[in-house]
């Protein structure tokens, strides 16, 4: 039931993206998100899609594995798309029924917004699919290390993130087992209206919370038994190093932001007729 949640699930394979430094992948994701929200027309959005496609190709992660991340937010995407379609105004009326009006500008904005959200989810899923939770938290800790000058608990934050990412697949498996057990006892999670489905989930949440607290207590006892204190003098088995792959990724995403900015400025001059219909106001 929850197998479509790809966040926190690592896909092991030997690829260009997997071998890259987690710090540069985090910065690349931030740059990619910035480029998506800077994009103001379909040309700059297409450039973001090209970079996303290159990331999927060089990661060697199956496309269906990345697309499965969309299913988890499909309802939210449809809901926001319908709202934008019905309530976005414009000048070119396409269809009207009673007080419901659909404009050409609303259709264009809905398509643009849906594609932006789609690319955002796929890019975020690609990061967790190509980076282990330990490497991801090490990268966050390294990037936030300057905050230690103001006594910010960077190591504690990295430990919390590492544990949270590590237990996402575990809690998903636990949820699936509880749901299977409830179905074997006659529970129905797939029929009825939305209120009946929400009510059917309550017997799943209670044992899931109990299991999560029990695992947290066992983890705390195990850390105490091993004398873990979170000291700043702790060393790491694997040290992060920048390489030639990271330089290429940096240049690619720097070019992405520059290209998006240029397309936002000069797209009207290059395609004056088409841009009138696709530009967002």
Image: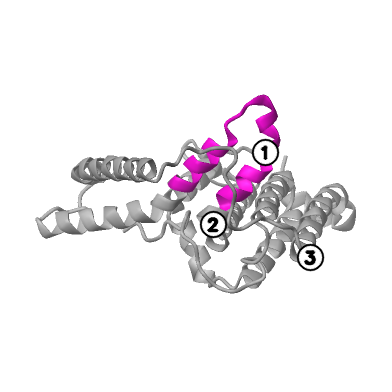
Q: Nearer the viewer, residue 102 or 113?
A: 113
Name the front one of labels 2 and 3. 3
**What residue is drawn where x is 74% and y is 58%?**
242
**What residue is drawn where x is 25% and y is 45%?**
211
- Answer yes or no: is residue 101 visible: no
Residue where numbered disc 2 is placed: 128
Q: Nearer the viewer, residue 59 or 88?
A: 59
Under tag 1, what secondary structure?
Answer: helix
Give the label on residue 188, or none: none
Say if 115 sits above or below 90 in the image. Answer: below
Pointer 2 or 3: first along the chain: 2
Under tag 2, what secondary structure?
Answer: helix
**Left or right: where does residue 49 sit relative to residue 168?**
right
Give the label on residue 145, or none: 1
Q: Which residues are magenta?
A: 136-163
Q: Toward which corner of the image does residue 239 lie, by quadrant? A: bottom right
Which quadrant: the N terminus? Answer: bottom left
At label 3, counting other C-alpha atoms closer than 10 Å, the crowd grade (few under 14, some 14-19, many 20 or more) is: few
State the separation of the CA atoms marked 2 and 3: 21 Å
Pointer 1 or 3: first along the chain: 1
Rendered location of residue 99, percent (x, y): 48, 35
Rendered location of residue 105, percent (x, y): 66, 45
Magenta stretch contains residue 259:
no
At label 1, counting other C-alpha atoms closer than 10 Å, the crowd grade (few under 14, some 14-19, many 20 or more) is: some
Rendered location of residue 132, percent (x, y): 53, 58
Q: How many marks?
A: 3
Pointer 1 or 2: first along the chain: 2
Residue where numbered disc 3 is placed: 244
**Left or right: where does residue 127 sit relative to residue 72?**
right
Residue at the top extreme? 150
């Amino acid at each position: 039931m929850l197998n479509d949640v790809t966040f926190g699930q690592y896909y092991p394979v030997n690829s260009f993206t997997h071998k890259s430094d987690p710090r540069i992948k985090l910065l690349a994701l931030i740059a990619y998100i910035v480029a998506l929200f800077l994009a103001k027309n379909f040309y700059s959005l297409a450039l973001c899609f090209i970079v996303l496609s290159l990331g999927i190709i060089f990661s060697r992660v199956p496309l269906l594995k990345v697309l499965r991340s969309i299913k988890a937010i499909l309802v939210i995407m449809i809901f926001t798309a319908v709202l934008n379609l019905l309530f976005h105004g414009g000048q070119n009326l396409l269809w009207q029924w009673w007080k419901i009006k659909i404009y050409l500008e609303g259709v264009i904005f809905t398509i643009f917004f849906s594609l932006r959200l789609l690319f955002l989810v796929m890019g975020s899923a690609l990061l967790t699919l190509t980076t282990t939770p330990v490497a991801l938290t090490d990268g966050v800790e390294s990037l936030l290390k300057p905050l230690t000058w103001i006594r910010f608990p960077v190591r504690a934050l990295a430990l919390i993130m590492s544990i949270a990412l590590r237990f996402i697949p575990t809690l998903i498996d636990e949820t699936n087992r509880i749901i299977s057990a409830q179905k074997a006892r006659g529970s129905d999670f797939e029929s009825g209206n939305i209120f009946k489905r929400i009510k059917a989930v309550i017997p799943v949440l209670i044992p899931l919370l109990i299991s999560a607290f029990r695992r947290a207590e066992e983890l705390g006892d195990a850390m105490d038994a091993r004398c873990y204190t979170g000291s700043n003098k702790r060393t790491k088995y694997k040290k992060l190093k920048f390489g030639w792959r990271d330089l290429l990724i940096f240049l690619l995403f720097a070019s992405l932001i520059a290209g998006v900015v240029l397309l936002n400025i000069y797209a009207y001059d290059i395609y004056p007729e088409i841009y009138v219909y696709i530009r967002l106001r």
